[in-house]
Amino acid sequence: MHNIKDKQLIKHFSYINGSWHSSETNIDVLNPATGELVASVSNAGVVETEMAVKAAKKALKAWSNKPANERAKLMRTWFDLMMANQDDLGRILTLEQGKPLAEAKGEIAYGAAFIEWFAEEGKRVYGDTIPAPANDKRIIVIKQPIGVVAAITPWNFPNAMIARKAAAALAAGCTFVVRPATQTPLSALAMAELAERAGIPAGVFNVVVGSDAKAMGKVLTEHPDVAKFTFTGSTAVGKALISQCASTVKKVSMELGGNAPFIVFDDADIDAAVRGALASKYRNAGQTCVCTNRIFVQQGVLTEFTEKFVKAVQTLSVGNGLSAGVTIGPMISVEAVTEVANLVEKSVQAGAKVVLGGQQGCDSTSANQNFYQPTVLTSVTNDMPIAQNEIFGPVSPIIAFEEEAQAISMANDTEFGLAAYFYARDIGRIWRVAEGLEYGMVGINEGIISNAAAPFGGVKQSGNGREGSKYGLDDYLEIKYLCMGGLDK
Ligand code: NAP
């Protein structure tokens, strides 16, 4: 199938307790670029989800008791296998999700980097000793794995959103159950196949594929044996899942929606800003949580930036992600395209102008309506639907501003607070704006900011908790305070 060398990486069953489980019905995984069937996968449900939690609970003691360096060796082998199979994993990802092959292979390397990084960091789970208030006492702090971790992940990064969570969980000594998005289960199952080949013991990493998100989500958020629940997806679903977790007071991490501002000040390097905006906006056809959602440009450089940016967007090539030279693949579904088209239409009615794109479809000859042309809108205001909603598509709304304080205030005028970007040269301005933006991550003269060593996460309704970095490991650890008394003679 499509030049995949190792056919064993295409799996059709959920992976629970180290074995592959079939179910009575199937989910058809379709290629969003062509509508063709990629594979059929067994449709698991509540029973299999409960089995996976039970398996993770059973495996917990042995895995958490393993010295960190032994866990690290197994995880390192898992990383090595992912990189050795990067081409196949990338192809599987493009087939089920649509992003261009080069981007898909980039996602595999990005996901694998978390496994490599956390394998090392797991060896550095240090405790503390604290001076006690009395001579006969000692205060010691140790950190222990939180327990069984359950995760639900979205379709836009079918590998990396799982790797980011599983890497930290396994390194901390936790065991893991993930329910991937219904549209993209194959990348998750290929990760399970490689985890098994790496020698990760049965029950430590489980993948349950099923279309009944609500019922499976109920098990993962309410099961008393799950100690922590971690979710990446929309804010609306995240809110519902947080409240479900309340019944058993689980530790919760949420990576939710965004509405990233990208601010270009009049002292910016405009060519660099154009490159940054292009990368940050159009990656994955605009379907990432940290995608630029609103481009604010200071009046003095508005014409120059807009002209150069439109020229750069014109160079993007839309098509099947497996075709050479394609830089924008399909969107995940025709419904997603319709939502983007509606936002554009409503904003045009409110006064926005389409200066590029604005049409559905790959090209004039293609019948596939899963594509949306890279689009640039001008004369946009911050109250238009295209600025107030997460676009999740390849559309750039350009909003003009006069003063620095006005840009910060408009950028912060959203319930989201995930990523923000700005381009400027003045060092005073750089500090003022960086500190004034109410976001968990800020790219300063940078359009692509995520990596395994840095803390990824949002504030406000974009979520809580961090993934990646030493802070990301803390999310999978409990702090235990030991008070040792009776030490006087
Ligand atoms: P979504 O609708 O919230 O779906 C995400 C996951 O939740 C999928 O696996 C989905 O399953 C599942 N789900 C849906 N309803 C559920 C329910 N009632 N109970 C349990 N699980 C449920 O989000 P999406 O539209 O697929 O993904 C895009 C969103 O994710 C955007 O808002 C984006 O910003 C956000 N995101 C955030 C980050 C971050 O790190 N902050 C990263 C990537 C994406 P099905 O597949 O079966 O629907």
Image (tube, grey):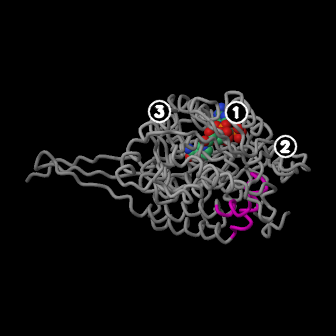
Q: Which mark is residue 369?
A: 2
In the picture shown, does residue 161 fall above or below 247? below
Whole-percent x, y for residue 47 in the image:
70, 38
Could you say which is closer to the camera, residue 249 or residue 67? 249
Q: Amino acid at mark 3?
A: Val
Could you say which is closer to the camera, residue 54 or residue 317? 317
SS category of the residue bearing label 2: loop
Could you say which is closer to the camera, residue 80 or residue 69? 80
Whole-percent x, y for residue 237 in the image:
61, 33
Residue numbers of the magenta segment: 85-106
Q: Quadrant of ligand 1?
A: top right
Residues at badges 1 and 3 in contact (C-beta under 8 Å)? no
The residue where tag 3 is placed is 249
Q: Amino acid at mark 1?
A: Leu
Label 2: few (<14), some (14–19) or many (≥20) C-alpha neighbours in 10 Å:
many
Q: Amino acid at mark 2?
A: Gln
* Distance from the alpha carbon under mark 2 to that under mark 1: 17 Å
Could you say which is closer to the camera, residue 435 or residue 153? 435
Q: Which mark is residue 279?
A: none
- Indicate which disc, 2 or 3, sits on the residue closer to the N terminus: 3
71 relative position to 138: left or right: right
Q: Is residue 315 magenta?
A: no
* Furthest residue in direction left, as rendered: 489
318 relative position to 414: left or right: right
SS category of the residue bearing label 1: helix
The residue where tag 1 is placed is 343
Whole-percent x, y for residue 384 in the image:
62, 30
SS category of the residue bearing label 3: loop
Label 1: few (<14), some (14–19) or many (≥20) C-alpha neighbours in 10 Å:
many
Predominant SS of the magenta segment: helix
